[in-house]
Amino acid sequence: MSHHVSVTTLPPDGEKLQITKFTSWRSIFMLTAIAGVVASAFLFLSHGETSNSYAFSYLFALEVFFTITAGATFWVLLHNASNSSWGVAIRRIPELMTQLFMPLFVLALPLFTPFVSLKNKPEFMGKVWEWVGIHQQIQSSVSVDGVKTLHDALGATHDTTLLYKKYGYLHTGIDGIIPGMDWRMIIFFGTLLFIGSKLLRYSLSQDKTGAVQPTYSARRFSCGMLPVFAVCSTFAGIDWVMSMNHTWFSTMFGVNIFAGSALASMAAVILIVGTLVKTGHFKHIVTEEHYHLMGKLMHAFIIFWAYIAFSQFFLIWYANIPEETQFYAIRNTNGWWYVSLALVFLHFAVPFVIMLKRNSKRNLNAVMAVAAFVIFVHMLEIYWMVIPERARALEYGSSSGLGTDFFRDLLFDLIALLTFAGTYGFFLIRQLSKHSLYPCGDPRLEESVNVVS
């Protein structure tokens, strides 16, 4: 840095978002969200193959934005738990991103229908999660021939023995010591929103007083909540994605989801911070040193993701157990093979090589370009995880492996993605306009703005 910046020269109340520079974007996001919600409601209410197919698109979009938001929660927890000083300047961005769990929860309700009984669950739930459909079918035998519960009914036939054994976890209601998937969804969203809101309150209270106590409180809270975050992040991925095929399992799947989540969220933070810098914000706050540090973290998780993704594939490959290999068997055949191959290069090789160069991490345009690319590939990976199950569940397909209604389904995917993107963008701008863009009362702010990496 060319000179030292003193916090006494900075505005005492921090910096507010210049909302006039984002008026057009806010309107575009709002209109996109409204149009998407209306279209989604129409498609869900259409019933039959239309709603069944759209439900997969909707889950894909939900998982993309949930993982990015969960990753933001991780970075806030990590910054506080590790007593990071350099991250103070950019910490408010992921803190505000964590508040977007609430609109995501509202958008998720039509997919999970948590307050609807099993027998009244919509048909698409039984298609997205095959075990839900089997539960609905088997439930008709409850109280017949001495069978009193759904659990007993699942154990009465050989075909559903696996679901009988997994019933303690794979169910939708309150039955046993573990709440069902519907209730776990509420718990995951509620817990992560609580963590994010608590840490934001600590940070905002420090803005007003400048006291050091909120830093200590946030550190203790973050250390305790990191394992809680790990549980929520892991089991959300297991519930919503891995259990789509209840016969498949992987002990590394939760870590795989986390790796992509942390990577994509850091990329999102880079894009948001970079956009704010380009629109005249963060003067004397964010420098190329911060781009370098954020770029190094993104680079580290590119490598970590590759390690976890390869480890999962390698362990399943050499074990060669049919129940495990089916996940890759579907995605390594026909048209999906090209997507699997693309992920190797696009998710790892290309960004890894680009980010090896020091100047790539210190140049704002370069690091933002890589961040945008990383988010695109993260969406591709989630698409690769979720969408191949659509053809299997709906029993249609073609020689390409992409389905006979490929273009219709692709339109559904785009509608769902735009619905979530519009909603997310609108509420993100709203959150950014509420508070200072950086923790102006943090005692470590001066150390952060003058960091040298």
Image: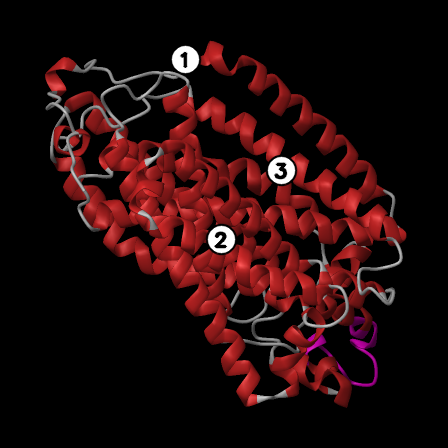
Question: Nearer the observer, disc 2 or disc 1?
Answer: 1
Residue count near mark 3 (Cα–Cα under 10 Å), binned few <14, some 14–19, many ≥20: many
Would you say the residues marked 1 and 3 are in contact, meaning their CB atoms lie under 8 Å apart? no
Q: Name the residue that disc number 1 marks.
A: 18
Magenta stretch holds residue 368? no
Identify whether 350 is placed above or below 253: above
Which amino acid, by three-letter code, is at mark 3?
Phe
The C terminus appears in which quarter of the rendering? top left
What segment carries the magenta color?
138-151
Q: Name the residue that disc number 3 marks.
A: 420
Out of 345 and 322, give the one closest to the viewer.
345
Out of 392 and 186, give the one closest to the viewer.
392
Which amino acid, by three-letter code, is at mark 2?
Ile
Image point 43% across, 59% down: which residue? 259
Q: Which mark is residue 187?
A: 2
Image point 71% across, 58% down: which residue? 387
Quarter of the figure with residue 388: bottom right
Question: Nearer the observer, disc 3 or disc 2?
Answer: 3
Would you say the residues marked 2 and 1 are in contact, meaning their CB atoms lie under 8 Å apart? no
Q: Say whether residue 191 is visible.
A: no
Separation of marks 2 and 1 at Cα, in angstroms = 36 Å
Quarter of the figure with residue 292: top left
* Position of residue 176 measured from the top left corner of the image (x, y, whole percent): 54, 71
Q: Say whether residue 358 is visible.
A: yes
Separation of marks 1 and 3 at Cα, in angstroms = 24 Å
> Which type of secondary structure does the marked residue at label 3 adopt?
helix
Separation of marks 3 and 2 at Cα, in angstroms = 21 Å
> Which type of secondary structure does the marked residue at label 1 adopt?
loop
